[in-house]
Image: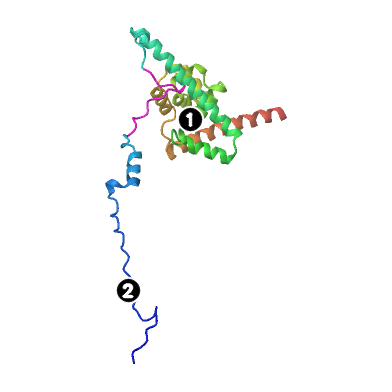
Amino acid sequence: MAKERVAGKDFEVVRKPRARKPKEAPPSLAQSAYLTTVMNTVAAPVEPPPPPMVQALDGDVFPPLPEGRIPQTVDEFINRISELWEDAQQRFLRIGELLSIAETRLSEEDRAALYDGLNRRFGKSARSQLMSAYRAIRDNVVPVEVAAAGYGTVYMLARLSDDERRQAAERGLLRPDVRQSEVRQFWKALRGPAPSNATRRAELEARRAKLLLEIQKIDDELAGLIN
């Protein structure tokens, strides 16, 4: 007996495969819109900047002297250079003044920060000499005209005792054009090497004998008054 076919059930449904859309190849680097955008925004290699130009103290670019302001004779050169040198000495006095003010007005922490910042230019020794030189001029320990000799020279003269400075003045060392080598030579001659123990002992014994003789004279005088 033949099997009864049931409509919709006794036949095989064959599904036709769906045609696939071929994949597009990825764009090459040359065709990449992103890369094109990036490349268009990349600037050309930047050349290193030129070295900074020398700046004057007032912040303007330091220009060369105009031809009309260049000295022509020896005397003109001497006068102009001397003027600039004196101006430089006034600047060292101002630096010494500012350092002295900072010593009294800044806290210990702020002074440490100040000195740390200044160490890139000059150290503790220079600061000490600048302040000492300024105070010596301010207090009339060293004549103000000697400032033209430089703060190092003023500092050396300030370290002398009053009697030693008097001797320096007698030798003509307290003048504006004195050289530091002159003051140094005077210093060495004045404070030569320390005496040996034997020499020092002889000096003390001589002083002791002189004092004993003076005491004897005083005792004799007192005895005469009593009698």
11 vs 148, left or right, is: left
- In the rendering, at what x and y percent does residue 65 appear? 36, 14
Residue 65 or residue 107, whichever sits in front = 65
State the SS at label 1.
Answer: helix
The image position of residue 90, as x and y in percent, is 49, 20
Farthest residue toward the right?
226
Q: CA distance from mark 1 to mark 2?
A: 108 Å
The percent position of residue 48, horizontal first and vertical second, equals 32, 34
Front residue of 195 and 24: 24
- Is residue 51 found inside the magenta-colored segment of the image? yes
> Which quadrant is the N terminus positioned in?
bottom left
Residue at x 43%, y 16% (from the top left corner)? 84
Q: Disc 2 residue type? A: Val
Numbered marks: total: 2
Q: Is residue 227 visible?
A: no
**Residue 113, placed above or below residue 24:** above
State the residue in front, 227 or 76. 76
**Residue under circle 1?**
129
Q: Quadrant of residue 120?
A: top left
33 and 152: which is toward the camera: 33
- Give the magenta part as a residue range: 48-63
Please, is residue 111 above or below residue 178 in the view?
below
Q: Earlier in the sequence, mark 1 or mark 2?
A: 2
Q: Is residue 193 magenta?
A: no
SS majority, magenta: loop
Q: Is residue 224 left or right of residue 191?
A: right
Q: Which residue is disc 2 drawn over? A: 14
